[in-house]
Amino acid sequence: MIDMIDAFLEHLEIGPLQQDIPELLEAIGDHADTILTRMPYGDELKGLATSAGADIAKVILFNLGYDEQTQKAV
């Protein structure tokens, strides 16, 4: 899972967000608890990150990208 998230973030880094990824992850990490309380599956994401030993900010960002693609498919 961690490798999949890192691959996703590498894909973002070749696009227009290239320079902003570290700053974006820092901002997400600083506000992770607030963000997670507003997400439909926030508790699940937190548990997933904890059990996998993944950075919660990366998991949140990955999930936002996943949700965006899911919404486009509907």
Image (cartoon, rainbow, N blue to C red):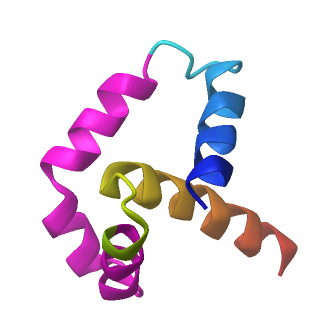
How many numbered badges does the structure rendering display?
Answer: 0
Q: Is residue 27 magenta?
A: yes
Residue at 47 percent across and 52 percent down: it is 61
Q: Quadrant of the C terminus?
A: bottom right
Relative placement, left or right, of 7 versus 27 is right
Q: Residue furthest top?
A: 19
Relative placement, left or right, of 27 versus 12 is left
Residue 57: % across, % down: 34, 51
Relative placement, left or right, of 9 versus 20 is right
Above or below, 44 against 61 in this view is below
Residue at 40 percent across and 76 percent down: it is 45
Residue 34: % across, % down: 15, 67
Q: Of helix, strand and loop, which mostly describes the magenta segment?
A: helix
Above or below, 32 against 44 in this view is above
Above or below, 26 against 39 in this view is above
Relative placement, left or right, of 58 versus 62 is left
Residue at 27 percent across and 73 percent down: it is 36
Q: Residue furthest right?
A: 73
Above or below, 61 against 16 in this view is below
Q: Relative to the observer, which residue lies in front, 16 or 44?
A: 44
Q: Is residue 65 magenta?
A: no
Q: Which residues are magenta?
A: 20-49
Residue at 22 percent across and 47 percent down: it is 29
Quarter holding residue 72: bottom right
Q: Quadrant of the N terminus?
A: bottom right
Residue 71: % across, % down: 72, 73
